[in-house]
Amino acid sequence: MTAPYATRRAAERFPTVLWNDSADPVELARSIEFGAVGATCNPVIALAVVKAHLDAWKPRIAQLAAEHPAASESEIGWKVVEELSIQAAKLLEPAFRASGGRNGRLSVQTDPRLHRDADALVAQAVHFAGLTENIIVKIPATSVGLAAIEEATYRGVSINVTVSFTVPQAVAAAEAIERGLDRRAAEGLPEREFGSVVTLMGGRLDDWLKAWVAKNRILIDPGYLEWAGVAALKRAHAVFRERGFRSRVLSAAFRNHLQWSELQGGDLVVSPPFDWQARINENEIEATDRIGVPVDPHILETLQAKVPEFNRAYDIDGMTPAEFDTFGATVRTLRQFLEADEALDQVVRDILLAPV
């Protein structure tokens, strides 16, 4: 019998797997019907879920505050992130069991306020990994994050690399995971399926390049910039295969359906927000094997000739780890994650200290 949804049909035909870019339990249950076998949570997502389901979360946040009378607003907010993650992880347990741990993962993001402290990132990653067996922990692809990724992997944490937009970041992060796995093997630590993934936020790369060309008064067909993230994702996937990395590329931060359809056929993860999945299905975007089809050479050559910032993102050696920290998309995204942290604190504050 033919699957009813385009996303599910694609998941049944190709090794490319679908994850849901949200831990909202209502959306995730529906996304699983669409073929999803993974999901993610972070302060941005937690904030959206709490606001969408305030009737349920308002009394729970008040209860958490009563149970932890000395906890700060931030600490209570992160307990909400943990509870939401555990709930979502439960929905994914069947996929986790069926795949032997390769899928069925719920991603939890480390606190963005720790992005300058590798030891703190590792400690929180180990804590999150202990919440439930199918948790995978997000650590940023910054110079500090790379050290934390290697160490957390060595300590047995499954990793989802985040705040990552470029081929050099993806390759450096995959190499850090390899070093962590090799250290485990050298010490005879148990081997298992970690299911680690390296996210490349293609849409956020597109966003940054659009801002960069506007600031630098460079005129280019705007449609070409819709292909920049896709080109970087295709190249990262090819490098991962060539080098035999044990992690997979994950496509996130969707801005167009190409970031789903152009990656079908590859052994990687696509993680659109639920609404993008719904639109793909509503529009019957039928998947074909496109991962090996290169981006139009004229588009690629134009980007390389007119947008030096694209070359930094596309070339394997386009940036050093120190440069990851100041790359425009990195700065923008870390700021957004930090702002979401503050907004979640504000929601908790408004519940605990309701205006009179």
Image (tube, grey):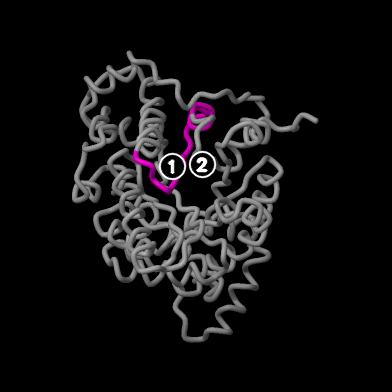
Q: What element carries label 2?
A: strand
| Sequence order check, earlier mark of 1 and 2 | 1
The location of residue 34, given as percent across then percent down, is 68, 40
The location of residue 68, given as percent across then percent down, is 53, 84
Left or right: where 24 falls relative to 151: right
Can you identify the residue that label 2 sits on? 269
In the picture, residue 118 is in which quadrant?
Answer: bottom left
| Residue depicted at x 21% and y 38% | 317
In the picture, residue 235 is in which quadrant?
Answer: top left
Q: Is residue 66 among what the camera can see?
A: yes
Can you identify the residue that label 1 sits on? 249
**Within 10 angstroms of label 1, few (less than 14), some, or many (20 or more) residues?**
many
| Residue depicted at x 26% and y 59% | 144
* Residue kind at label 1, given as amino acid type: Val
Q: Is residue 249 magenta?
A: yes
Q: What stretch is highlighted in magenta?
A: 243-262
The location of residue 309, given as percent across then percent down, is 23, 32
The location of residue 167, given as percent across then percent down, is 31, 38
**Is the residue 266 above or below the residue 93 in the image?**
above
Left or right: where 39 falls relative to 343: right
Pick the front one: 178 or 252 = 178
Q: Is residue 356 among what the camera can see?
A: no
Q: How many labels does the image show?
A: 2
| Residue depicted at x 29% and y 47% | 172
Q: What element carries label 1?
A: strand
Cβ atoms at labels 1 and 2 below 8 Å apart: yes
| Quadrant placement of the C terminus | bottom right
**Is the residue 195 above or below the residue 81 in the image?**
above
| Quadrant placement of the N terminus | top right
* Residue kind at label 2, given as amino acid type: Val
**Is the residue 149 above or below the residue 294 in the image?**
below
**Is the residue 295 above or below the residue 184 in the image?**
above
